[in-house]
Image (spheres, helix red, strand yellow):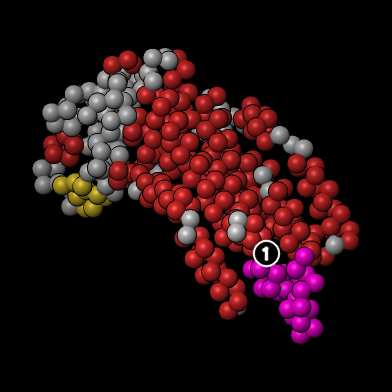
């Protein structure tokens, strides 16, 4: 265990020597923070409020509509909080998001005291009130992009979490046991490699009555594990004959313990690299589907759906520029993280660069 711990510490030290990789990692961390705190960054629902003697967090409705307290529907707030809080409970108070704009609808006139309604169509050009402009319906683009960050990262992490789990399991079984098990897992991997992910997603969307973003994540995950499985198989084939594995087997350790305790920790470094690249690929697939109109259904906000909105009015250049830059920088950041991880963990690449 000490050797494995020392390897990761040394790999981190080598990774930190790469400025681009560190900048990319910082950008990914920034995106994670935006995704985690999106309801507190942009929205029209209070982050925390006191209403009729009790505390509520209406902003959680952006995570799931079922989290919105029933009392506000009962008192007919209809999604408008500033005036209703003041009129229906003069003693109420609220902590508001940093940016008072809703990702799913246009803000109405005087919804926030003294603020005009959101401009729509060509009038929604970027301004001080709307740094990234508004779309055809007057919905603020910055608010949509903030909440779209959650969708983008969720697609990458969930889909590659599924793909990584399946790929490591199948690759480990085939690489460790060999024989007919290896033959079966290899044939299954080759069959899945022949399935086009995009076509399968479009077919599933056409069949399912109410498709969600979770269906997209599942399909990407269940079809994107083949490269991980082949790499895992190769690592297990290489490591199962190592001396420490032989010693563990002689000490009476079972196959499961040897695979999980001894081989997998030493095989994990090269396996993480395609997973990192896969996150970037998954984000691109989701953005492409949303651009074509097959992505997350309304009211979900995603970067690709903002791009899709520009197709009906090409004069609204801000609907292309800002989400396009976000997709480009995110995919680039994950690729740089993967490249830095590969160089930090692969001694052959380090020797080649000397």
Residue 312 placed where, x, y %? 45, 14
As drawn, which residue projects farthest toward the bottom?
251
Q: Nearer the viewer, residue 304 or 345?
A: 345
| Residue positioned 69% across, 73% down in the render | 262
Q: Nearer the viewer, residue 74 or 45?
A: 45
Residue 74 in sight here: no
The vertical placement of 150 against 4, above or below, is: above
**Label 1 CA crowd tier, 10 Å (few <14, some 14–19, many 20+):** many
The vertical placement of 155 against 173, above or below, is: above
Is 262 covered by the magenta stretch?
yes
**Residue that carries the numbered disc 1 in the rendered image:** 267
Residue 269 placed where, x, y %? 62, 62
Give the position of the N terminus as an image quadrant: bottom right
Label 1 element class: helix
Residue 45 placed where, x, y %? 27, 40
| Residue positioned 33% across, 35% down in the render | 143
Q: Is residue 134 left or right of residue 272?
A: left
Is 17 covered by the magenta stretch?
no
| Residue positioned 42% across, 41% down in the render | 149
| Residue positioned 39% across, 35% down in the render | 145
Q: Main secondary structure of the magenta part?
A: helix
Quarter residue 123 falls in: top left
As drawn, which residue projects farthest toward the right?
180
Q: Is residue 127 left or right of residue 252?
A: left
Residue 88 placed where, x, y %? 15, 39
Give the position of the C terminus as an image quadrant: bottom right
Instruction: Please give the range of residues in magenta.
Output: 238-266
The vertical placement of 146 against 259, above or below, is: above
Residue 8 in sight here: yes
The vertical placement of 258 against 51, above or below, is: below
């Amino acid at each position: 265990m000490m050797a494995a711990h020392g390897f990761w510490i040394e790999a981190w030290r080598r990774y930190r020597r790469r400025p681009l990789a560190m900048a990319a990692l910082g950008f990914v961390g920034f995106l994670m923070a935006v995704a985690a705190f999106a309801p507190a960054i942009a929205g029209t629902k209070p982050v925390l409020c006191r209403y009729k003697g009790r505390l509520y967090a209406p902003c959680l409705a952006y995570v799931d509509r079922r989290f919105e307290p029933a009392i506000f529907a009962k008192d007919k707030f209809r999604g408008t909080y500033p005036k209703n809080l003041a009129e229906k409970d003069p003693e109420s108070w609220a902590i508001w998001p940093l940016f008072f704009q809703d990702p799913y609808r246009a803000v109405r006139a005087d919804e926030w005291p003294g603020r005009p309604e959101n401009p729509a169509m060509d009038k929604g050009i970027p301004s001080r009130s709307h740094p990234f402009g508004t779309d055809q319906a007057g919905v603020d683009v910055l608010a949509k992009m903030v909440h779209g960050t959650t969708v983008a990262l969720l697609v990458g992490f969930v889909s590659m979490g599924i793909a990584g789990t399946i790929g490591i399991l199948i690759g480990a079984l085939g690489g460790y046991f060999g024989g007919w098990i290896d033959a079966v897992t290899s044939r299954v991997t080759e069959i899945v490699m022949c399935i086009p992910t995009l076509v399968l997603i479009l077919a599933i969307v056409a069949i399912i009555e109410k498709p969600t973003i979770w269906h997209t994540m599942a399909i990407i995950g269940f079809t994107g594990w083949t490269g991980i499985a082949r790499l895992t198989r190769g690592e297990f084939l290489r490591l199962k004959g190592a001396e420490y594995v032989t010693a563990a087997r002689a000490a009476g350790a079972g196959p499961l313990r040897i695979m999980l305790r001894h081989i997998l920790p030493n095989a994990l470094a090269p396996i993480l690299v395609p997973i990192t690249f896969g996150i970037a690929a998954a984000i691109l697939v989701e953005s492409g589907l949303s651009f074509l109109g097959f992505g997350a259904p309304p009211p979900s906000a995603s970067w690709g759906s903002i791009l899709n909105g520009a197709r009906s009015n090409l004069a609204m250049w801000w609907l292309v520029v800002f989400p396009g830059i976000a997709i480009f920088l995110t995919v680039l950041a994950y690729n740089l993280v993967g490249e830095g991880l590969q160089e930090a963990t692969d001694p052959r690449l380090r020797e080649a660069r000397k």
